[in-house]
Amino acid sequence: MKVCGVEIKAKEAILAIVEIDDEGGLLHIKSASKKLSLNDDRDCKSVQVLFEAIKALAKDHNLKCFVIKTRQTKGQMAAGGVTFKIEGLFQLSGIPVEFVSPQALSKLSSKNTGAIPATINQYQSDAYLAAVSELAKL
């Protein structure tokens, strides 16, 4: 089962694709797409381009779901509106979407269920952990 962890920051969706291998271990799937960006959130064509990129990613990698790291909706540290527009595009992609809290990712990381592979860039670590959190439920 392949899942894609997603961390949305500003105008970018940071991605990490992970699957369970034949021995039950976690395997990071290298992809040309490590980030997807929304260049202009007020331009309809830019939004459509991102939407098509999300659908193509899901199809090309035969993804079973996206797992999105949640963001605060209220308060001083609330995420910007553009991030929720990007989240909506993932939800409309036709692929199931699950959510995981930052607290759950911290807990998973502290359990040290497996080191983050060297193929994951530092900025992708939360997206990787989001994917792993979904696979850990199986």
Image (cartoon, grey):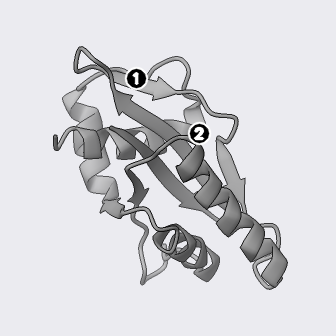
Is the residue 60 above or below the residue 73 in the image? above
Residue shown at the point (32%, 61%) measured from the top left: 98
Q: In the rendered image, is residue 122 in sight?
A: yes
Give left or right: position of 120 versus 10. Answer: left
Q: Residue 115 at what x, y percent from top left? A: 36, 20
Quadrant showing the N terminus: top left
Q: Residue 108 at what x, y percent from top left? A: 24, 39
Helix, strand or loop for disc 2: helix
Q: Mark 1 or mark 2: which is in front? A: 1
| Label of residue 27 in the image | 1
Q: Residue 67 at what x, y percent from top left? A: 39, 55
Helix, strand or loop for disc 1: strand
Along the viewing direction, whichever of 17 and 59 lies nearer the viewer: 59
First in sequence: mark 1 or mark 2?
Answer: 1
| Label of residue 52 in the image | none
| Label of residue 123 in the image | 2
Along the viewing direction, whichever of 96 and 111 lies nearer the viewer: 96
Quadrant showing the C terminus: top left
Is the residue 10 above or below the residue 64 in the image? below
Q: Residue 7 at what x, y percent from top left? A: 51, 54
Amino acid type for the residue under numbered disc 1: Leu
Q: In the rendered image, is residue 11 in sight?
A: no
Q: Quadrant of residue 123?
A: top right
Residue shown at the point (31%, 59%) measured from the top left: 101
Amino acid type for the residue under numbered disc 2: Tyr
Mark 1 to mark 2: distance in Å?
18 Å
Residue shown at the point (25%, 51%) measured from the top left: 104
Q: Quadrant of residue 89?
A: bottom right
